[in-house]
Image: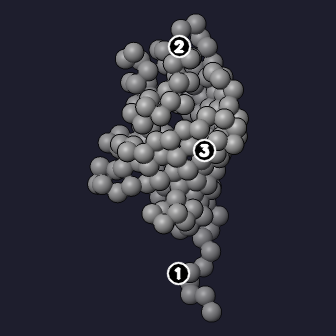
Amino acid sequence: MMRESEAMPEKLERELTLTRTLAAPRELVFKAWTDPGHLARWWGPAGFTNPVCQVDLRPGGALYIVMRGPDGNEYPMKATFLEVVPPERLVFSSAAVDAVGHCQLEGVTSISFVDLGGKTRLTVHTRMKGLVPEAKFMLAGMEPGWNQSLDRLAAEVERR
């Protein structure tokens, strides 16, 4: 017999689209998303670091990032590139996993990069689904987390 606390989580989903105009050329913004050195400097909310950042930039290639929060906790994210169209578009499926590799959250993210003559219009569209009850907190933090990440991305590319 299944106890109430063991019941399947309710269907938790969230979709988000964010658009920014960055004062940097499209090629640099694309590189910031695809070069592990760049990506490690800006990925994640304010105060997070990325001690592990691996990128195999090709359809079917892997993206693996371990975010470390200010409290020292680590949050692994693994992804697979579905589309890679330099410097115009990236699409990847991703999963947030716990310390032992169990999937907590999964979804698909697409990023478009539009050349604005030395600037770039960046559009991020993501749809995520929670697989465990705790995912409701991750989904609730999705918009502020992405906004903080994009703030960090802007700082990364606009200082160059």
Instruction: Answer yes or no: is residue 103 visible.
Output: yes
Q: Picture coordinates of residue 10 (x, y %)?
A: 62, 68
Whole-angstrom CA distance, mark 1 to mark 2, is 50 Å
Rendered residue at 32%/42% (across/down): 47
Q: At label 2, which amino acid type do we have?
A: Pro
Q: Secondary structure at mark 1?
A: helix
- Crowdedness of circle 1 by 10 Å Cα count: few (<14), some, many (20+)? few
Q: Quadrant of the C terminus?
A: top left
Instruction: Look at mark 2 in the image and give the residue it sits on.
Output: 25
Q: Picture coordinates of residue 77 (x, y %)?
A: 51, 51
Rendered residue at 36%/50% (across/down): 68
Whole-angstrom CA distance, mark 1 to mark 3, is 34 Å
Instruction: Look at mark 3 in the image and give the residue it sits on.
Output: 62
- Crowdedness of circle 2 by 10 Å Cα count: few (<14), some, many (20+)? some
Q: Nearer the viewer, mark 1 or mark 2?
A: 2
The label shown at residue 144 is none
Q: At label 1, which amino acid type do we have?
A: Ser
Q: Secondary structure at mark 3?
A: strand
Query: Which is nearer the eye, 20 or 79?
Result: 79
Q: Earlier in the sequence, mark 1 or mark 2?
A: 1
